[in-house]
Image (cartoon, helix red, strand yellow):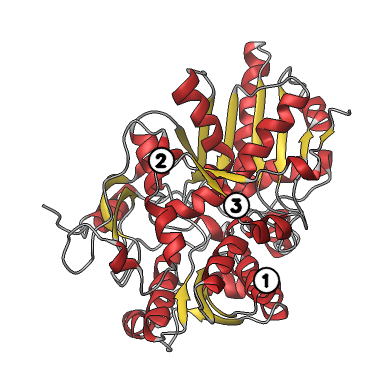
Amino acid sequence: MSQTKIMLEEKEIPTRWYNIQADMPNLPKPPLNPRTNQPIGPEDLAPIFPLELIKQEVSTERWIDIPEEVQQIYKLWRPAPLYRAHRLEKALQTPAKIYYKYEGGSPSGSHKTNTSIAQAYYNKQAGIKRLATETGAGQWGSALSMACEFFGLECTVYMVKVSYHQKPYRRLLMQVYGAEVIPSPSQLTNAGREILAVDPDSLGSLGMAISEAVEDAAMREDTNYALGSVLNHVCLHQSVIGLEAKAQLAKVDAYPDVVIGCCGGGTNFAGIGFPFVYDKIKEGNKVRVIAVEPAACPTLTKGKFTYDYSDTAKLTPIMNMYTLGHDFMPPGIHAGGLRYHGDSPLVSQLYHDGLIEARAVTQKGCFEAATLFAKNEGILPAPESSHAVRAAIDEALAAKEAGEEKTILFCLSGHGHFDLASYDTYLSGKLEDYEYPEELINKSLANLPEIK
């Protein structure tokens, strides 16, 4: 078997998801009701989520069976390939071995389909007719639009306005799948109207789009809300990435010293990283697991570990996480999927406990790394994935400097075929770096909820 492309057989696709809540030394503090500040129960989530997803959200079972119908749809693109980046290694002249798990071969072009199929399935089983959601760069909106079409559900997507205009082909792909796509903030919800009354030119944010989608779902009995990141059940569904990667590396007798994933809400990072964090917790492995975020939206590296609202309008549960403040307004960077003020409570807790690492990188450096990667490996990374590429290259160069052999694994979570306008901005020299000022972060953090 070639080390350049490592495949699993169809029968080796995982049949169970891995739930890290079974093994964490400290579980996150419970989410709170935004009206009462008391821990939420299933009855609080039932208006917008099906019961099976609520059960997964709170489960501490290590393994959760993947429904047969979901497994069959997974086989459209899974198992996803694992590549050894020989040409990139040669270009860097590094002694490091670089592997990448490529999730861009899914029908929607990213890892998001791993959870969209599961969420659409469980909602269909619960008798739901329509799903409302938000999307940043459009990968999640595309994935859910496709999943809804597969299961005969209607789909409405509130797309962050800056991405709606930056990435028109993502919008068109959602519409091809049959979804209604609305630039957010919009005039269709109370949350959107309130935002536009204060700032008519608002670029939007994931927090704002979440508010609109949740309000939409709450207004209709036939509609539920679907979230593509942050929540525990989404981390769970993405674990197929890391589980497959472990099995593929075992085929070539390899194991990573470093595992890397880009991090916005945190579930792509969780997907590649949590199965290896298991090894760290249960078997004492020394593997480093690194979450890479934008310097323009430095949630883990500059945020505060505390309770905060998950959305701008304060409609969703208050979660204990690393946050930049629920009214944090990130700049319109090209990695739209990483422009979220908070992080997954699971990722946040593991970072707080020192079981994972985090670093922030600038977007010019990311596009430089992505371009180098494309020239050598042939795959054009999505701007979000370019953050993982940047960190992997930096780790390989550090190994070169130290004269160390090192095995690096990163998740290439999606392709950049719909992001060529972003690459045009970079190649024409118009792309600018932006590091969010400390004083603006402090201003946003001043408005955190008061939880006793």
Query: How many other residues sit within 10 Å of disc 2, few (<14), some (14-19) or many (≥20)?
Result: some
Q: CA distance from mark 1 to mark 2?
A: 29 Å
Q: Residue furthest left?
A: 452
Name the residue rendered at 68%, 38% in the picture: 244
**Residue tagged by mark 1?**
146
**Circle 3 crowding by C-alpha within 10 Å: few under 14, some 14–19, many from 20:** some
The image shows residue 324 at horizontal and vertical percentages of 33, 53
Q: Are marks 1 and 3 in contact (CB under 8 Å)?
A: no
- Residue wearing tag 2: 21
Task: Give the left or right position of residue 407, taking residue 323 as reference.
Answer: right
Mark 2 / mark 3, whichever is N-terminal? 2
In percent of width and height, residue 9 lies at 81, 40
Look at the numbered disc 1 and give the secondary structure of its residue. Answer: helix
Q: Earlier in the sequence, mark 1 or mark 3?
A: 3
Q: Amino acid at mark 2?
A: Gln
Instruction: Report the amino acid beneath label 3.
Output: Ile
Residue 330 higher or lower than 101, as above or below:
below
Q: Secondary structure at mark 2?
A: helix
* Residue drawn 41% across the image and 86% down it: 220
Residue 110: quarter of image: bottom right
The residue nearer to you, when weighing 220 against 127, is 127
In the rendered image, the residue lying farthest to the top is 403
What secondary structure is marked by label 3?
loop
> Which residue type does callout 1 highlight?
Met
**Residue under pointer 3:** 66
In space, the residues marked 1 and 3 are separated at their CA atoms by 19 Å
Q: Is residue 14 visible?
A: yes
Residue at 84%, 27% in the rendered image? 3
The answer for how far apart the CA atoms under marks 2 and 3 are is: 17 Å
